Image (tube, rainbow, N blue to C red):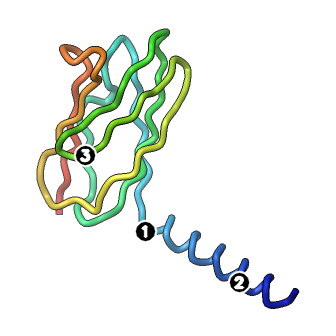
Amino acid sequence: MPRARTVLLLLCLCAAGASADEAELKIVIEGHRFVPPEIRVPAAKRLKLVVENHDATPEEFESYALNREKIVIPGGRSIIYVGPLDPGRYEFFGDFNPATARGWLVAVP
Protein backbone atom coordinates (compact mmCIF):
# COMPACT_ATOMS: atom_id res chain seq x y z
CA MET A 1 0.00 0.00 0.00
CA PRO A 2 2.72 2.61 0.79
CA ARG A 3 4.39 1.78 -2.54
CA ALA A 4 1.16 2.52 -4.44
CA ARG A 5 0.89 5.90 -2.68
CA THR A 6 4.50 6.69 -3.58
CA VAL A 7 3.88 5.86 -7.25
CA LEU A 8 0.71 7.97 -7.25
CA LEU A 9 2.55 10.89 -5.65
CA LEU A 10 5.33 10.67 -8.26
CA LEU A 11 2.77 10.62 -11.08
CA CYS A 12 1.09 13.73 -9.66
CA LEU A 13 4.43 15.52 -9.35
CA CYS A 14 5.36 14.63 -12.93
CA ALA A 15 2.00 15.88 -14.21
CA ALA A 16 2.38 19.13 -12.27
CA GLY A 17 5.86 19.64 -13.71
CA ALA A 18 4.61 19.04 -17.24
CA SER A 19 1.82 21.60 -16.94
CA ALA A 20 4.27 24.23 -15.64
CA ASP A 21 6.21 23.91 -18.91
CA GLU A 22 3.25 24.66 -21.16
CA ALA A 23 1.47 27.91 -21.91
CA GLU A 24 -2.34 27.99 -21.87
CA LEU A 25 -4.12 30.18 -24.41
CA LYS A 26 -7.82 30.85 -24.98
CA ILE A 27 -9.37 31.29 -28.41
CA VAL A 28 -13.08 32.06 -28.84
CA ILE A 29 -15.24 31.27 -31.86
CA GLU A 30 -17.78 34.07 -32.22
CA GLY A 31 -19.66 35.19 -35.31
CA HIS A 32 -17.92 32.41 -37.26
CA ARG A 33 -14.54 34.02 -36.51
CA PHE A 34 -11.64 33.21 -34.20
CA VAL A 35 -11.05 35.85 -31.53
CA PRO A 36 -8.32 36.92 -31.39
CA PRO A 37 -7.38 36.06 -34.99
CA GLU A 38 -3.64 36.17 -34.29
CA ILE A 39 -1.82 35.08 -31.17
CA ARG A 40 1.88 35.48 -30.44
CA VAL A 41 3.20 32.46 -28.58
CA PRO A 42 6.61 31.50 -27.24
CA ALA A 43 8.60 29.26 -29.58
CA ALA A 44 10.01 26.00 -28.22
CA LYS A 45 7.21 25.69 -25.66
CA ARG A 46 4.30 23.26 -25.51
CA LEU A 47 0.93 25.03 -25.83
CA LYS A 48 -2.51 24.21 -24.50
CA LEU A 49 -5.14 25.91 -26.67
CA VAL A 50 -8.58 26.18 -25.09
CA VAL A 51 -11.06 26.81 -27.91
CA GLU A 52 -14.53 27.96 -26.81
CA ASN A 53 -17.43 28.07 -29.28
CA HIS A 54 -19.86 30.91 -28.50
CA ASP A 55 -21.79 30.35 -31.75
CA ALA A 56 -25.02 28.37 -32.12
CA THR A 57 -23.43 26.08 -34.72
CA PRO A 58 -20.48 23.68 -34.51
CA GLU A 59 -17.07 24.65 -35.84
CA GLU A 60 -13.97 22.65 -36.57
CA PHE A 61 -10.57 23.96 -35.54
CA GLU A 62 -8.27 22.74 -38.29
CA SER A 63 -4.65 23.39 -39.10
CA TYR A 64 -2.49 21.69 -41.69
CA ALA A 65 0.56 23.54 -40.32
CA LEU A 66 -0.08 22.27 -36.78
CA ASN A 67 -1.45 18.88 -37.89
CA ARG A 68 -4.57 19.32 -35.73
CA GLU A 69 -8.30 18.90 -36.32
CA LYS A 70 -10.99 19.13 -33.65
CA ILE A 71 -14.74 19.81 -33.69
CA VAL A 72 -16.00 22.31 -31.12
CA ILE A 73 -19.72 21.94 -30.39
CA PRO A 74 -21.98 24.99 -29.91
CA GLY A 75 -21.49 26.37 -26.41
CA GLY A 76 -18.67 23.89 -25.86
CA ARG A 77 -14.94 23.97 -25.58
CA SER A 78 -12.09 21.79 -26.77
CA ILE A 79 -8.51 21.52 -25.65
CA ILE A 80 -5.81 21.18 -28.30
CA TYR A 81 -2.15 20.63 -27.48
CA VAL A 82 0.53 21.80 -29.92
CA GLY A 83 4.26 22.30 -29.90
CA PRO A 84 6.89 22.90 -29.07
CA LEU A 85 6.94 25.06 -32.20
CA ASP A 86 9.81 26.46 -34.22
CA PRO A 87 9.66 30.23 -34.75
CA GLY A 88 7.20 30.99 -37.54
CA ARG A 89 3.58 31.62 -38.49
CA TYR A 90 1.09 28.73 -38.24
CA GLU A 91 -2.34 29.09 -39.84
CA PHE A 92 -5.55 27.55 -38.45
CA PHE A 93 -9.10 27.84 -39.77
CA GLY A 94 -12.68 26.79 -39.16
CA ASP A 95 -13.41 24.02 -41.60
CA PHE A 96 -17.16 24.79 -41.56
CA ASN A 97 -16.63 28.55 -42.21
CA PRO A 98 -13.20 28.84 -43.86
CA ALA A 99 -13.90 32.24 -45.44
CA THR A 100 -14.36 33.96 -42.07
CA ALA A 101 -12.91 31.65 -39.39
CA ARG A 102 -9.18 32.10 -39.91
CA GLY A 103 -6.33 32.65 -37.51
CA TRP A 104 -2.61 32.33 -36.88
CA LEU A 105 -0.28 31.30 -34.10
CA VAL A 106 2.92 33.28 -34.40
CA ALA A 107 5.76 31.53 -32.54
CA VAL A 108 8.45 33.99 -31.50
CA PRO A 109 11.83 33.24 -29.93
Q: Is residue 63 above or below residue 2?
A: above
> Identity of the amino acid at label 1?
Asp
Of tags 1 and 3, the one toward the viewer is: 3
**Comes first in the chain, label 1 or label 3:** 1
User: Element type at marker 3?
Assistant: loop
Residue 7 image label = 2
State the CA–CA distance, disc 2 to disc 1: 22 Å
**10 Å crowding of disc 2: few (<14), some (14-19), many (20+):** few
Q: In the rendered image, which quarter contains the N terminus?
A: bottom right
Residue 67 image label = 3
State the CA–CA distance, disc 1 to disc 3: 21 Å
Q: Which residue is mark 1?
A: 21
Q: Is residue 108 above or below residue 16?
A: above
Q: Is residue 59 above or below residue 87?
A: above
Q: Residue at x 39, y 34 (%)?
A: 70
* Image quadrant assignment for residue 23: bottom left
> In x, y percent, where is residue 43?
23, 61
Q: Residue at x 72, y 77 (%)?
A: 8
> In x, y percent, where is residue 21?
43, 68
Name the residue furthest right.
1
> Identity of the amino acid at label 2?
Val
Q: Nearer the viewer, residue 54 or 60?
A: 60
> In x, y percent, where is residue 35?
34, 26
Name the residue furthest left.
88
Q: Residue at x 34, y 31 (%)?
A: 61
Q: Are marks 1 and 3 in contact (CB under 8 Å)?
A: no
**Comes first in the chain, label 2 or label 1:** 2
> Identity of the amino acid at label 3?
Asn
* Image quadrant assignment for residue 69: top left
